[in-house]
Amino acid sequence: MAEFERDLIRERNKAGLSAARPMGRMGGKPKGLSKAAMSKAHAAKALYDKKDKTGEEIGKALGISRATVYRYIKEIEQQQRFVKRKQSSKQN
């Protein structure tokens, strides 16, 4: 009985997802950082590049944790590498 109910739920779920796709709905969590997080990420990267503050000090100044500071820095560096790769492929 439970297996039958589970199959019904699964079918309804698939039907709903199939109906949503043509309307541009994909579901799931959006990738990347929000605008507010992106501005904090750029600020964190700028402070980190000056090399006069630790990750913990930067976090306290921006109101985020030390781990988030390093996660934001990594995100900005990945974006910068992506942009460089994209620009170099256009030149070739």
Image: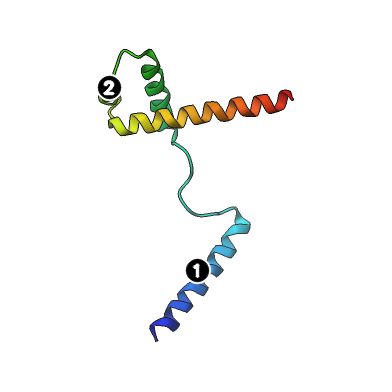
Instruction: Quadrant for residue 52, please give it.
Output: top left
Q: Residues within 10 Å of mark 2 (few under 14, many from 20)?
A: few
Front in this rendered view, residue 2 or 50: 50
Q: Amino acid at mark 2?
A: Ala
> In the rendered view, how is the structure colored?
rainbow
**Secondary element at tag 2:** helix
Categorize mark 1 by other alpha carbons within 10 Å: few (<14), some (14-19), many (20+).
few
Q: Residue at x 59, y 64 (%)?
A: 19
- Where residue 86 appears, x then y in whole percent? 64, 29
- Image coordinates of residue 42 in percent, x first then y, are 43, 23
Question: Who's the residue at 43% across and 77% down the image?
Answer: 6
Residue 12 falls left or right of residue 44: right
State the residue at coordinates (45%, 32%). 75
Q: Disc 1 versus disc 2: distance between alpha carbons?
A: 45 Å
Determine if residue 36 is in view. Answer: no
Residue 53 coordinates in the image, percent (x, y): 29, 16
Q: Could you say which quadrant of the image residue 48 lies in?
A: top left
Residue 25's place in the image compared with 79, above or below, is: below
* Residue projecting furthest to the right: 92
Q: Are marks 1 and 2 in contact (CB under 8 Å)?
A: no
Q: Amino acid at mark 1?
A: Asn
The answer to whether residue 54 of the structure is visible from this angle is yes
In the image, which disc is placed on residue 76?
A: none
Disc sitting over residue 13 in the figure: 1
Which residue occupies the foreground of this view, 40 or 82?
Answer: 82
Relative to 63, say whether 4 is above or below: below
Q: Which residue is mark 2?
A: 61
